[in-house]
Image (cartoon, rainbow, N blue to C red):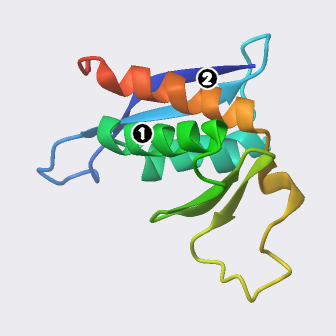
Amino acid sequence: MSLRCFIQTQAPVPGSAAQPVHYPACEWVSDDGTGDHQHPLNRFVCSWLTSDMADVAHCDEVLHAMTQIEDGAREKWFVDGDAFNVDMAINGVQFNQSNVDSDDLAYWNQPDGRFTWPEVKAMLLAWRDFLAQPIKH
């Protein structure tokens, strides 16, 4: 598995005088280089990175908390974002969409939103390194 990071361009509404908008984005791709937008790594982790983790400082904050969990200085950590709520513990990382309340058991803590610690950390590190580079349009 690998993370493909790139600068996404959103074109303006046709006929408007607006300029295109450029922003960092990422997607998980399989070993053969193909992507599947419905794959859970894209639906949860990559969507979280693109929407809620769009700056290096925030990535560093989460990586620092992850290090504290790895070192045993903290047991778990909760990341509250615009698009996702993320529960981090050494035994796994659970993603829930921010628009879903914890009382809605049919959509909260779903198995397809749970990932291993190493895969989330590896993707976050790759994303952070991408964001730290100068943006090229």
The amino acid beneath tag 1 is Cys
Which residue, given by chain and number where applicable, does mark 2 sit on? 3
Q: Which comes before the other along the chain, label 1 or label 2?
A: 2
The amino acid beneath tag 2 is Leu
Q: Position of residue 71 (x, y in %)?
A: 62, 37
Label 1 Cα crowd, 10 Å radius (few <14 / some 14-19 / many 20+): many
Residue occupying the far bottom of the picture: 103
* Camera-side mark, 1 or 2: 1
Q: Position of residue 81 (x, y in %)?
A: 47, 63
**What residue appears at the point 23 percent right and 18 percent down from the top-left corner?**
134
Q: Position of residue 47 (x, y in %)?
A: 57, 47
**What residue appears at the point 62 percent right and 32 percent down from the top-left corner?**
121
Q: Are marks 1 and 2 in contact (CB under 8 Å)?
A: no
Residue occupying the far left of the picture: 17
Quadrant placement of the C terminus: top left
**What residue appears at the point 57 percent right and 71 percent down from the top-left corner?**
98
**SS for callout 2:** strand
Which residue, given by chain and number where applicable, does mark 1 sit on? 59
**Left or right position of 71 against 115:** left
Give the distance between the C-alpha atoms of the residues marked 1 and 2, in whole angstroms: 16 Å
